[in-house]
Amino acid sequence: MHPGQHLAAIVFLVSLGLTGCASDHRKDIAFHVLFSEDGSPNAEAFSLALSARIPSGSSVETLRTFVERGGGSCEEREAGHLWCEFVTRAKYCAASMLGIDVTLQSGAVGRIKVVAGGLGC
């Protein structure tokens, strides 16, 4: 084997190790946990996941930041309740959404309940 062939073989093995053997299925796993086979959201799974991610007693600002980072928004609709929304999927004249009803306790996050819905024309 010539020196150039050795170098080519090493480059091939290194590139195979960096790309060919790498995989990342985190998004697929998360999707299958949170959505049903037909792609509709599992509101109970979302409620449990959000409650684990932002447990009771967390600051409202922590929740707001989480929602805003996901492209959503929150507003206080009535005393003791915060309503947050995410658009999960949008297409011409229709959108799938997740609503998050947060019961506040002493100014902090209390119970989280997720509701799946949508808008259309």
Image (spheres, helix red, strand yellow):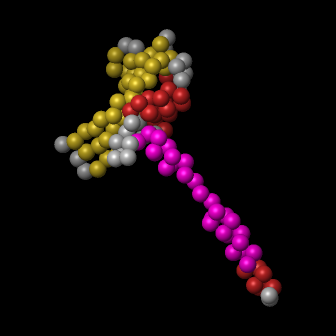
**Residue found at x 72% / y 80%:** 8
Give the residue furthest to the bottom. Answer: 2
Q: Main secondary structure of the magenta part?
A: helix
Residue 21 image offset from top left, x and y in percent: 64, 63
Please name whichever residue, 20 or 65, is drawn nearer the observer in this view of the structure: 20
Can residue 75 be seen by looking at this rendering?
Answer: no
Tell me where the magenta segment starts and ends, as one range. Answer: 9-35
Q: Is residue 33 magenta?
A: yes
Q: Is residue 44 magenta?
A: no
Number of numbered tags placed on the structure image: 0
**Residue found at x 40% / y 25%:** 113
Give the residue furthest to the top. Answer: 106
Give the residue furthest to the left. Answer: 121
Can residue 76 be seen by looking at this rendering?
Answer: yes
Q: Where is residue 16, by image quadrant?
A: bottom right
Residue 66 image offset from top left, x and y in percent: 50, 33
**Residue found at x 49% / y 11%:** 106
Q: Image check: 24 left or right of 6?
A: left
Residue 6 image offset from top left, x and y in percent: 78, 81
**Residue found at x 44% / y 23%:** 112
Q: Image check: 10 left or right of 94?
A: right
The C terminus, quarter of image: top left
Q: Where is residue 45, by image quadrant?
A: top left
Please name whichever residue, 83 or 36, is drawn nearer the observer in this view of the structure: 36
- The correct choice, above or below, for 111 with respect to 53 in the image is above
Residue 49 image offset from top left, x and y in percent: 49, 32
The N terminus, quarter of image: bottom right
Please name whichever residue, 13 or 110, is drawn nearer the observer in this view of the structure: 13
